[in-house]
Image: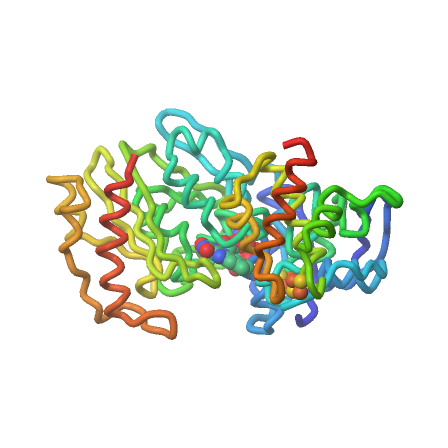
Amino acid sequence: MYSFNYERPSGINDAAGAVGEDDKFLAGGQSYLPTLKLRLAQVDKLVDLGGISDLKGISVSGGEISIGAMTTHGTVATSSDVRSSIPALADMAAHIGDAQVRNRGTIGGSIANNDPAADYPSALVALNATVHTNKRSITADDFFVDLFETALEDGELITKVTFPVPQKAAYAKFPNPASRFALVGVFVAQTTSGARVAVTGAGPCVFRQSDMEAALSGNFSGAAVKGIQTVADKLNADIHASADYRAHLISVMAARAVDAAS
Amino acid sequence: MTSVSMTVNGKSVNADVEPNTLLVQFIRENLRLTGTHVGCDTSQCGACTVHVNGDSVKSCTMLAVQADGSDVTTIEGLASGDDLHPMQTAFRENHGLQCGFCTPGMIMSAVDLVKRNPNPTEETIRKELEGNICRCTGYHNIVKSVKDASEKMGG
Ligand SMILES: Cc1cc2nc3c(=O)[nH]c(=O)nc-3n(C[C@H](O)[C@H](O)[C@H](O)COP(=O)(O)OP(=O)(O)OC[C@H]3O[C@@H](n4cnc5c(N)ncnc54)[C@H](O)[C@@H]3O)c2cc1C
Ligand code: FES
Ligand code: FES
């Protein structure tokens, strides 16, 4: 790692004030520290969010669940509040990486990073979540912009994510067996405003499969989506899987998720 | 330099470190506790697993300054005097290791696993150990060791 300065403020405003143009926030460090170790990035100062208790914790009220940005995947996976209101979200968190990664990695870090194979982006988009920052609220549909790109401005700090509780939902992931990132992951949700289907791992950024959403709005069953193809043109192809294979997996995973939804 | 203080295996330690010092470097090079291994240095293998405030973490993927104020336990801190921790005994009795390189990390992960799942099934043990890689044993006896220890630890 190149050298850098370090600060651990205890309040949200202090953190936002401490981060300059060439600085970065540090959450669980499970994506950014490996990046720094490989010298793929260089930073003047890391502003560690680990000392800000206002960014941690889970609460439920008015048909909505709110998860602080610094809440770890392990905490979401084992939270009785998440398990009882959106079990699909707890299940998804329980399958991110491995136990040690889940003990450090956070929801805020995962979505700010917007890795094309990360799990959380699909949950936020399918559940029609809202990302809250120190400046504004952004709907998940607007938040995830492109490969490793989000709507966040420089120095903008995610404080929490709120999820409206759906009627039912499920996530089905075909994990890369080595990293457990999603080769393809499909999060489906039945909401009061219709069915939502979000796909991660397959393209450069999470996206909604609108043909499947239309089919599910009339008939929420795995059979309704099994035969629906996704155009492979813009999908990822790498040593792990071809674009055609990923396109095929989207239909398979979507059908599995719909059949498992609860 | 930034000053850090933490408790490691029950003893309080203070030091001045560069912010880019990894927790594993601090443990091995400053504290000379070399039981914590570095296998991959890329967050994959789990050989560097220690407990921070009771939770298993990869110490190659955490800065020493992030552990400021924390309670850290390494493999050296598990036994009480000459009495091995039940997990260590179980690995010895069930041939849970061959070369032993992965073993400190395996044992630290396994202790955390049993804390969270007091009576784990074989499937749970295999899933929970996904973050630890062993090049020798084929995992079978590691799983057996964890199962045995969980029973002796009163699960
Ligand atoms: C071995 C391994 C396996 C993994 N497997 C998976 C997997 O299966 N699925 C998956 O989804 N992920 C996986 N991950 C990634 C993991 O989930 C990371 O924890 C996550 O992507 C980043 O979260 P973090 O808290 O560690 O963030 P960090 O690494 O600390 O930060 C990541 C980025 O987000 C920014 N950031 C962090 N918090 C905020 C905030 N509150 N506001 C604004 N910006 C912020 C940082 O500046 C940085 O740019 C894996 C990681 C490892 C090491
Ligand atoms: S050395 Fe830390 S995970 Fe391999
Ligand atoms: S015993 Fe040799 S790596 Fe596990």
Residue nearer the viewer, B133 or A13: B133
The quadrant in which residue A162 appears is top left
Residue A191 lies, with reference to residue A95, above or below; the image says above
Judging depth in this view, the residue of A246 and B4 nearest the camera is A246
Looking at the picture, does residue A234 appear above or below residue B3?
below
**Visible in this render: residue A33?**
no
Q: Quadrant of the N terminus of chain B?
A: bottom right
Relative depth, front residue between A138 and A185? A185
Could you say which quadrant of the image residue A65 lies in?
top left
Residue A218 vs residue B114: left or right?
A: left
In the rendered structure, the answer to whether residue B92 lies left or right of residue A192 reads: right
Task: Return the x and y of residue A27 as percentages of the image width and height.
Answer: 58, 52
Residue A8 visible somewhere in the drawing: yes
* Residue at 15% from the left image edge and 46% from the top image edge: A223
Question: Measuring 63% from the left and 58% from the top, which residue is drawn there?
Answer: B46
Residue at the far left in the pictured view? A218
Q: Which quadrant: the C terminus of chain B? A: top right
